[in-house]
Image: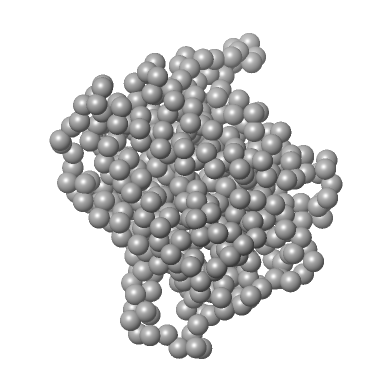
Amino acid sequence: MEDHTTSRLAATASPLGEPLLTATGQRADRDAEAQLPPYRSAGASFSRTCLNLTNAVSGIGVLTMPYAVSRGGWLSLALFALVGAVCYYTGTLMARCMRADGSVATYPDIGQLAFGAAGRRTVAVFMYVELYLVAISFLVLEGDNLDKLFPGAGVELLPGYRLRGKQLFIVLAGAVVLPTTWLRNLGVLAYVSALGLVASAALTASLVWAGVSESGFRTNGNVLNLAGLPASLGLYFVCFTGHVVFPTIYSSMKNRERFSQVLLISSVLCGLNYGFTAVLGYLIYGEDVQSQVTLNLPSGRLYTKIAIVMTLINPLTKYALLVAPITSAIEERLSLAGSGSARVAVSTTVLISTVAVASMVPFFGFLMSFIGSFLSVMGTVFFPCLCYLKIYKAKGLRRVEVAAIVGILLLGAFVAITGTYTSLLDIIGTF
């Protein structure tokens, strides 16, 4: 929630209960679009849209891929391919929903078109929760990796109380990103966050380097682990969670009829990168792979430092993009929109709350599994399928298409129930 999850989630700044065409809703939509200038350039070309969408889908989910394979076994990669295909198909369903009404501009708009104000509120609530949890996961990622770069660091705040390790770096990361959350226009950060593609390439190169020069490759590993499949499936869904920003990218295209082609290219590119990283990481570290594969890289090595630094850039630049829709919605609800001091107060409060929760979350992988199993499945499976069925029901649907959608909904229900249950047990078991 890259990620799986990232700047792709910042297109949902409209208040929860606002109708499509009110002045407040239009203002909130403009605020959301301002957070994502790379995706909103009018008449974007096919190649530019491919790059934008690939950056939107590519996120921190790549760090958890080797761990996901270790939980489910080698054969779970077949399910990874299935998840990628399902998310591609549901993305095309969203495009068809947008073609049904030219006023649709955001994901909550699709919910309202299908189910009225209740649909809009439901979609928005789930997305705001996902934004919040992904922001927390970013801070956890920063803390874990900075602690690996600077082991043993600590600061004595009060006599007898010393802030150290992961918690120290979570607080420091929060302090660094705090000023960026006060900005109204996050255009510069949105462009910098495009470094996500470079970071993914750097991580893959570092794993190749580690495998060749240091650890070598292992041939062991589980073929299939049924008990770990729910967690693996949840993490796989995180990798393809980009649906929140699809309406924004769709609207920016010069030729919107080619959106399905753009989505296919982006899904294949991201899937290959994810799959390659998963295979490399699991071959090198086997069952010892950690929830973030960067934590397995040898300390002190040049490629380790490069991989971690590149990995850390994304969360620092994208955190503000994630929380901007949340703070905007709170401002609208409290009638504080337009007040600079109110924005500072609200965004600071949101950041402090995420820092506090991140300091208590012990394992990045379990949190990402929960986000993927529950929230990402809702956004990538349930909402697109249900909205499509509702919008096009009167126009008639082919039986084959309805059967395929029902099958996808059953898969989503299985992942949501089993994956959420498993990830919550894992999280509770760590306290």
Q: Tell me the residue at 82%/55% (across/down).
A: 335
Q: Is residue 118 above or below residue 355?
A: below
Residue 205 placed where, x, y %?
35, 32
Q: Can residue 159 be seen here?
A: yes
Q: Quadrant of residue 202?
A: top left
Q: Residue farthest to the top?
A: 159
In the visual, does 415 lie left or right of 144? left
Q: Tell me the residue at 51%/74% (across/down).
A: 96
Q: Tell me the residue at 24%/26% (across/down).
A: 212
Q: Tell me the residue at 71%/41% (across/down).
A: 347
Q: Is residue 322 above or below residue 362?
A: below
Q: Can residue 326 be seen here?
A: no
The residue lying toward the viewer, choosing from 64 and 194, is: 194
The residue lying toward the viewer, choosing from 27 and 271, is: 271
The residue lying toward the viewer, choosing from 74 and 423, is: 74
Image quadrant containing the C terminus: top left
In the visual, does 241 lie left or right of 252? left
In the visual, does 248 lie left or right of 31? left
